[in-house]
Amino acid sequence: MNLALWLQRSAQRDGERTAVAHGLQRWCSYAELAQRAAALAAWLHGCGVEPGDRVGLFLANRPEVLVMLWGTWWAGAAAVPINAKLHPREAAWILGHSGARLAFVDATQRDELLACGAGCTLHTELPPLPAADTLSEPVPRADTDPAWLFYTSGTTGRPKGVVLAARQLRLASFGYLSEVQGVAAGDAMLHPAPLSHGSGLYHLPYVLHAGVNVVPASGGFDPAEIVELAAHWRNASFFAAPTMVRRLVDHVAAIGRRPEGLATITYGGGPMYLADIERALQVVGPHFAQIYGQGESPMTITVLPRDVINDTAHPQHRARLASVGHAQPMLEVSIRDEAGATLPAGTTGEVCVRGDVVMQGYWQQPEATAAAIRDGWLYTGDIGRLDDAGFLTLLDRSKDLIISGGSNIYPREVEEALLQHPAVAEASVIGRRDAEWGEVVVAYVVTRTPATASDLDAHCIERIARFKRPKIYRFVDALPKNNYGKVPKTELRDIEARRSDAG
């Protein structure tokens, strides 16, 4: 099916309801959004875009992005959303690799994209879109035709284009409605996170059920603005990376009152440490749900619902709060060893998933697809363990595992311990090569109040095995972050290697 049918149906049923808002103002209704999408589809066809072609979207968040996205689908093409914070050279590579026929880009990026060899026509604005008395029908598409090419962050080599079809996007939307929260007409989804990423995926259930998709006037994440938008639009939810949650919590603590109009903050996209979510619940209130997924299984592997997070009376509450929840209903989760054998509950191994929500494959990379999907199972590259109740605790990416003296050390365990110290604001742990031990544990730490290596060492010894504690502490003003707010441990390892080479 073509996902544009969702927009068409909402326009027919709830045409006068607000579809898109910009800040506190209504930007368009569902009837207007559908009309503009259909008109843009006709324009795209006039530009030579055929069903199955790719259309790039290299733009910061603004209301027009949603017209471009739905117009692309209405035309039967596949969207290639690109994080606006990427370097134009990276975006030009993605446009070239995807074979985009044309792309909508921010005006500030156009010249540099051309200089970097973007091999398609670039448009910085929507074309004039004439009104029509009747709408054309969305171009028919098969359930497995590409609809969204999601390019991975490319921490190791070039990014890979994850092919998501209507089937994957539909199941991801149903997962949200089933496991995170239902959506009623008029409920609001705020978009402070990039529409090219998780926030874009989470706008789909709101179009299906005639909710309001709100693009902040700032185009990004400002905690004070989010509080204002939630109070204005009511029943307001949003997707947030853990770094955004921490900023919101600091803001709410500073103003001394909880936000009004807030429904659910769905956090994911990186590790949320136990200390951070406990503080968030205390300061902001019972508004949190967690999802774990990756581009290859978009937002859909496990869920930690609000009712579980808020069940403080459960004897396993803190353990579950530190987990990423249980499997979502559209797939299976299995922990497997290096040979692909299923491991019993409580055993650590690679997280593997299977189901129709898993990607079609990597765009034009059959070998990479075959390496990631084996015997129908997606090997995520994440290390974790399932408990007897089916709750998944993530430890780390497999490439981040530290082996010291023959013992496995998972950086997240050490980071969790460090973050329980009141002086520690942020921590990231990596391994450093060592002639005697193979690797030793190095902790990069940002403090909010003074602390010494001895202080942190004593703190860790009380909480984790001695062999896991850091051998080296690096006190820094800030941790490096990528475009999605994650700490790129490859960069920290490079920094540490240069320190080692310099003696």
Image (cartoon, helix red, strand yellow):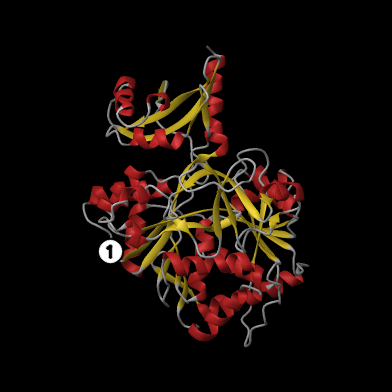
Farthest residue toward the top?
503
Q: Would residue 173 be found to the left or right of residue 445 on screen? A: right
Q: Mark 1 points at which residue?
A: 260
For the question of whether residue 310 can be seen, the reply is yes
Where's residue 256, x and y in %? 21, 52
- Residue found at the far left of this picture: 256
Q: Is residue 195 visible?
A: no
> In the image, 101: left or right of 299?
right
Up the image or down, 147 lies above or below 406; here it is below
Which residue is at a point 44% across and 65% down the rendered structure image?
A: 179
Q: Is residue 318 above or below residue 468?
A: below
- Taking the view exactly as shown, the residue that stands out farthest to the bottom is 133
x and y percentages locating residue 391 in the rendered image: 43, 53
Q: Which amino acid does label 1 sit on?
A: Glu
Q: Does residue 215 appear to the left or right of 452 in the view shown? A: right
Q: Residues within 10 Å of mark 1 (few under 14, many from 20)?
A: some
Q: In which quarter of the image is the N terminus?
A: bottom right
Report the number of numbered marks.
1
Pick the residue in front: 46 or 156.
156
Q: Which residue is drawn at 45% across and 54% down?
A: 220
Q: Quadrant of residue 426?
A: top left
The residue drawn where x is 41% and y is 76% is: 184
Q: What element carries label 1?
A: loop
| 309 relative to 7, above or below | above
Residue 476 occupies which quadrant of the picture? top left
Q: Residue 157, percent across and down?
A: 67, 38
Q: In this view, does 386 lie to the left or right of 350?
A: left
Q: In terms of depth relative to the viewer, which is nearer, 63 or 276?
A: 276
Position in image of residue 153 (x %, y %): 59, 45
Specify the farthest residue to the front: 344
Q: Which of 377 and 362 is in front in this view?
A: 377
